[in-house]
Amino acid sequence: MPHVITKILADDRRFELPDGAGSDAVHSDPQYGYAVTQLITEDKNQSGTGIAYTLGGGTHLVQSAIELLSEPLVGQEIEALMSDFGTVQRAMAEHHQIRWLGPHKGVTHLALASITNACFDLWAKARGVPLWKLLLDLSPEALTRLIDFSYLDEVLTADEAVSILKEKAATRSQREHILKEGYPGYDTSVGWFAYSDERIMENARHAIDLGFTAMKLKVGSPQPERDVRRVKKIREAVGDDVRIMVDANQAWSLPKALEVCQQLASMQPYWVEEPTQPDDILAHQTIARAIAPVPVAVGEAVSNRVMWKNFLQAGAVGVVQADCTRLAGISEYLAVSLLATKYPVKVIPHVGDMGQIHHHLVFFNHIALGHEKLFLEYIPHLREHFMHPAIVKDGAYQLPQEPGCSTDLLPRGKH
């Protein structure tokens, strides 16, 4: 039966964290939260849930923006809506009055992420398949119609995207074994900024016991020697074969980033994440050239495809941590994945299990776009709040089976 959207609900969900969890050099005491969109249909048993990730404060502003932007979707049938979703999303993003509040960033873009993700969730549920299968089963032409290619014309057109997808389709079967093997994860919860040295060493050993072979440490201290000491301690705890990433969460100026990265070089970090202000593309370019072959990783605060275009054009990023709960949802994420295929660089999304949707998207990226199988971030602090939390076994994400995007949250008070 057709699935017509009859009502749209927006919600502000916030969750307290255990002592010290989530802390970094800039965000000392975060909540984790979601701005939630729920698309209600005539079928009371079928709804779509979309999320945009926040750090708690101001989530109600995104909730209000969802209510404002989503009005045109009422009365729409989901198959018809998704048949040319790129055009639909562009119309929402480019509203002649509302776009002034962005454009393509901030509160309104987070709202667009939540709305978009709800549309994909409802579409996958209506077809009775998980998101990864929905995307893999689409023709190249149908998939590109999901994307707004505006402002990308000089580097990536819809026709070129179709060609990329068709070219990669020829070797899909060589990569489909990943559906049985699972997708590797890396553990971020090892090294929160507020954790003691003893705790990060204990966490690192525990991560190894759980099957992880890569982990991340928060850096960016006013005393760089603290960062250096903590990286050394984790290296001592896990040995030389484990990959260790460092994440400054935008704490450094360009001169400070260059200074501290030089001190960290002997520890052989697998990447340096968010070394400076996220809009400063030329500073990232300078850092990337200075620390090569260690790559710069960015993404959680790179808010739109145009910024990604510029980062890639400038050679300012080596690890694309695109986040469909910060970009304009799954649609814009697909645009960034295609850009990264063309250039190419590594794609390792931000917030794996906290974003839930990304453990669908990494399977799609590897099979449909030929992206290298690397790993996906693991931060387990919100698992208990989802109806179908991502399953991680022996350090690897297992293939989601339930229809949709895995974004349904349990009702308040039920976890």
Image (cartoon, grey):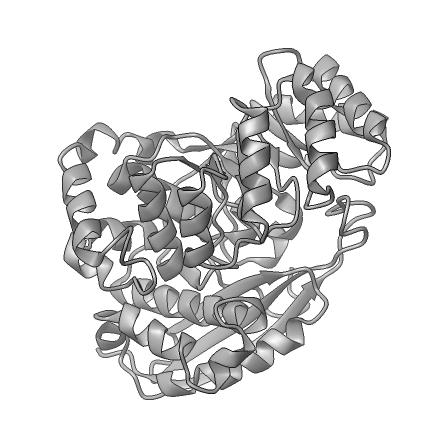
Q: Residue drawn 66% across and 11% down?
A: 239
Name which residue lies at 59% across and 34% down: 287
Q: Quadrant of the N terminus?
A: bottom left
How many numbered discs?
0
Q: Quadrant of the C terminus?
A: bottom right
Quadrant for residue 176, please give it.
top left
Asked which quadrant contains residue 89, the reply is bottom left
Whole-percent x and y of residue 13?
A: 64, 69
Q: Is residue 205 visible?
A: no
* Lateral position of residue 332 relative to residue 164, left or right: right
**Relative depth, front residue between 228 and 402:** 228
Q: Is residue 41 above or below residue 148?
A: below
Instruction: Name above or below for residue 209 compared with residue 168.
Output: above
Q: Residue 288: x percent and y percent?
A: 54, 32
Q: Position of residue 362 (x, y in %)?
A: 39, 42
Q: Residue at x 54, y 64 (%)?
A: 52
Q: From the viewer's side, name the closer residue of 410 and 165.
A: 165
Do we see residue 140 in this rendering? yes
Q: Nearer the viewer, residue 144 or 160?
A: 160
Q: Please state if 23 lies on the left or on the right of 268 as rendered.
A: right
Judge from the rendering whether residue 256 lies leftward or rightward of residue 64; answer left or right: right
- Residue 409, percent from left and from top: 55, 64
